[in-house]
Image (cartoon, rainbow, N blue to C red):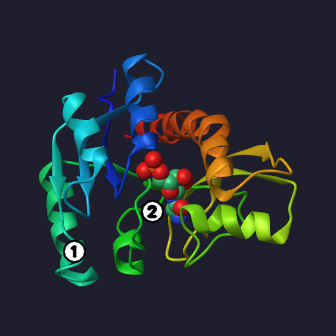
Amino acid sequence: MKPRVRTAVLVSGGGTNLQAIIDKSAEGAIPSAEIVVVISDREGVYALERADKAGIPSEVVPFKETGRGEFERRLAAALESRGVEMIVLAGFMRILSADFTAHYPNRILNIHPSLIPSFCGEGFYGLKVHKAALDYGVKVTGATVHFVNEIPDGGRIIMQKAVYIDDNDTPETLQKRVMREAEWVIYPEAIEKAASEIRRSK
Ligand code: GAR
């Protein structure tokens, strides 16, 4: 049997998607990937505690003090030292450069809380995405897992799931429902799908 795909999860915040991935992995639903490290671009975020509780090594590679160039050099070093083959962005709020993404073609996954190509691209992240959907007045939104390339939210789509909007939704209630009904469901599935393809090609 070929070894599991060594996977890093990159986070910036609360890490509920990370938790869903950890839980599904513990249930045996992501047999093709092994989470070898969780990396945050900021100190003190709850996602780091989630990693700790699950016994997964974690690192902070700070972005703010250094800027993107130095951040990406340090990130690449951390990934290489751990033999990482696949990168999962889970609420990671930085845009990676074209240079960086070119090193990992079809090896970086992201989840975005809308049905791409709606409400996506630079400036659309977190609650802002849900606010934009409500302001526009769409009646259906959802989540998308896609590969990451040099275009923000522009890489090939792996999986999507739709969620209906209620008349009295706020950005907060909608965010929560999109997470529960779509993100936490499709991200583990999409990770297994991508990892099993990488594993087969090893
Ligand atoms: C999630 O809704 C994720 O889809 C979104 O941020 C939230 C992070 O939550 N990501 C983006 O907006 C990326 N453009 P989490 O830290 O609890 O997983």
Q: Can residue 14 be seen from the camera position used here? A: yes
What residue is drawn where x is 86% and y is 61%? 138
What residue is drawn where x is 64% and y is 65%? 129
Residue 153 image label: none
| Callout in the foreground (1, 2) | 1
Give whichever of discs 1 and 2 has the lower sequence position. Answer: 1
Q: Residue 134 location in percent, x, y?
A: 77, 63
Dots 1, 2 in contact, CB < 8 A: no
SS at badge 2: loop
What residue is drawn where x is 15% and y is 69%? 74
Neighbourhood count class around disc 2 (C-alpha, 10 Å): few under 14, some 14–19, many 20 upward: few
Q: How far apart are marks 1 and 2 (CA)?
A: 20 Å
Disc 1 residue: CB within 8 Å of ligand 1? no
Taking the view exactly as shown, the residue that stands out farthest to the front is 168
Residue 71 image label: 1
What residue is drawn where x is 34% and y is 73%? 100
Q: Please identify the quadrant where the N terminus is shown.
A: top left
Taking 43 as reference, is 29 above or below it? above
Taking 167 as reference, is 177 above or below it? above
Q: Residue 198 location in percent, x, y?
A: 44, 42
Q: Quadrant of residue 199?
A: top left
- Under mark 2, the amino acid is Pro
Drawn side of residue 181 relative to residue 136, left or right: left
Q: Residue 191 location in percent, x, y?
A: 49, 39
- Under mark 1, the amino acid is Phe
Q: Residue 159 location in percent, x, y?
A: 66, 45
Drawn side of residue 103 relative to residue 16, left or right: left
Neighbourhood count class around disc 1 (C-alpha, 10 Å): few under 14, some 14–19, many 20 upward: some
User: Where does label 2 land, which residue?
Assistant: 105
Q: Can residue 201 be seen from the camera position used here? A: no
Instruction: Pick whichever, 171 or 189, lies toward us.
Output: 171
Instruction: Pick whichever, 151 or 89, lies toward us.
Output: 89
